[in-house]
Amino acid sequence: MKRINNISSQAGHIADLVPDQNQPRVYIETYGCQMNVADSEVVLSILVDNGYSVSHDPEQADVILINTCSIRDKAERKVFRRLDLFDRIKKNNPDILVGVIGCMAERLKEQLVNNYRVVDIVIGPDAYRKLPELIDEAGTGQKAVNVLLSREETYADISPVRMDKNHVTAFISIMRGCNNMCTYCVVPYTRGGERSRDPQSILREVDNLIKSGYKEVTLIGQNVDSYKWKENGGNIEVSFSGLLNKLAEAMPDMRIRFSTSHPKDLPDEVLSVMSRYNNICKHIHLPLQSGNNRILDLMNRGYTSEWYIGRINAIKRILPDCSISTDIITGFCSETEEEHKETLSLMEWVGYDFAYMFKYSERPGTKAARKLKDDVPEEVKSRRLTEIIELQNKLSHKAKIKDLNRVYEVLVEGVSKKSDNDLFGRTSQNKVVVFPARNYKPGDTLKVRINNCTSATLLGEPV
């Protein structure tokens, strides 16, 4: 395959990259979390720097990459369905190379190599720098595989090719991997241990986004609260609160968000920094998973419900206008009806603004799969999940009712899905607001008075 080497960095926005018939073309699909979106942007940057052009149509591509998620069985099944489609495309054009990258590549490397003829390349999250060479290797007819995990790789020196549609908001990965070893989770096995990026590289990336017209950045990591970097030969340690402080001080016109926090690691110092700077958004995503201490212990979450309540109280005390969202897993191994009700009770006490809610899905290779019995019947899991969703819908509606007649500062992100006459944006609290477009455009910041709401959205008028 024709490839151009030693091209200087061309990071920018994917919409600005015009397909070039003289260059090999790459098409990429992304599934899973915000970290996967950020990884796909890094992958595109690496390939563009090595002479590839971006295709928006898999049938017109020379290389098809699918960036995968292993967090739940449903996510993996979706990827296998896409591989079936790519297999049909490849039958019409045998020269197309198909690669599986990311967490599924790490977890299911042997299965993908041995059982899926359509797959030519398998590459884990820490080996993306090797992708150009692996594509060349696959072009000779060999299966190309690299799933080695790294203790150092953060891709800090790579300027991502941004894939967002609005050209207003962007993700920045500040760390990789996870040390928490929750018993249900595959992340430590597919992404390795924690390592943090040099804060100066993060500041440079945010500064580049400002120069490109971006208005908001979300700092992402599996557990941002455990971010840690040592400077000056280890004499100075930069914590997550220190990083937030540096960014907010240096970039006063950039909105700053972050995700995800861990209840056992969220300190008052982070909350205090958030309270001091208006450009740090007032929203915290704090996964609960379960409201019962026995289940939390089985999950190896590292905190109790009482500790979690203490963190919620700290948020409400230091940041009274902060919104709170969460993750809930229902039907974990041996969960009883009373333990399920404790989760419902704690949800109601917190009054979450929104939540991501799931049935427990056993992941092969995790401690829970090895040591615990997945013994809650599927119909019980489904019924409990329905109860959790119904309660959260009530809590979300209650939170929106409280917002009526309030005025929020809203960052415009794009055109409403339901009407070209309306725009949408988000408040500092991460609440979506729809309002008349008038002469506003994406990237504008304006005051909006909330006068109505749906189950998922606030409706307002610019003031």
Image (tube, rainbow, N blue to C red):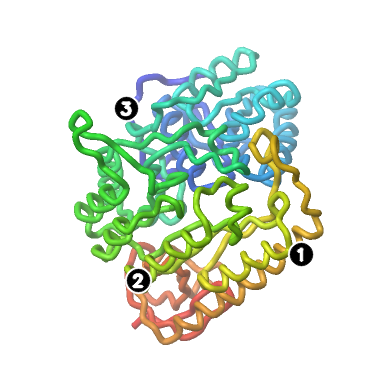
Is residue 348 or residue 361 the one in the foreground? 348
Q: Amino acid under label 2? A: Arg
User: Which image quarter is the C terminus in?
Assistant: bottom left
Residue at 41 percent across and 64 percent down: it is: 283
N-terminal of the pair, mark 1 or mark 2, is 2
Is residue 249 or residue 344 the one in the foreground? 344
Q: Amino acid under label 3? A: Ser
N-terminal of the pair, mark 1 or mark 3, is 3
Q: Is residue 113 left or right of residue 258?
A: right
Q: Residues within 10 Å of mark 3 (few under 14, many from 20)?
A: few
Image spot of residue 379 (x, y percent): 81, 59
Q: Is residue 210 left or right of residue 341?
A: left
Residue, disc 2: 317
Dot 3 falls on a residue whose secondary structure is loop
Q: Which mark is residue 391?
A: none
Q: Which mark is nearer the camera, 2 or 3?
A: 2
Image spot of residue 298 (x, y percent): 62, 47
User: Which image quarter is the N terminus in?
Assistant: top right
Q: Is residue 167 left or right of residue 128?
A: left
Residue at 59 percent across and 61 percent down: it is: 291
Q: Quadrant of residue 30?
A: top right
Q: Amino acid under label 1? A: Arg
Is residue 311 or residue 354 the one in the foreground? 311
Decide: is 52 above or below 424: above
Q: CA distance from mark 1 to mark 2?
A: 35 Å
Q: Which mark is residue 8?
A: 3
N-terminal of the pair, mark 2 or mark 3, is 3
Look at the image and tell me whether residue 425 can be seen. no
Residue, disc 1: 383
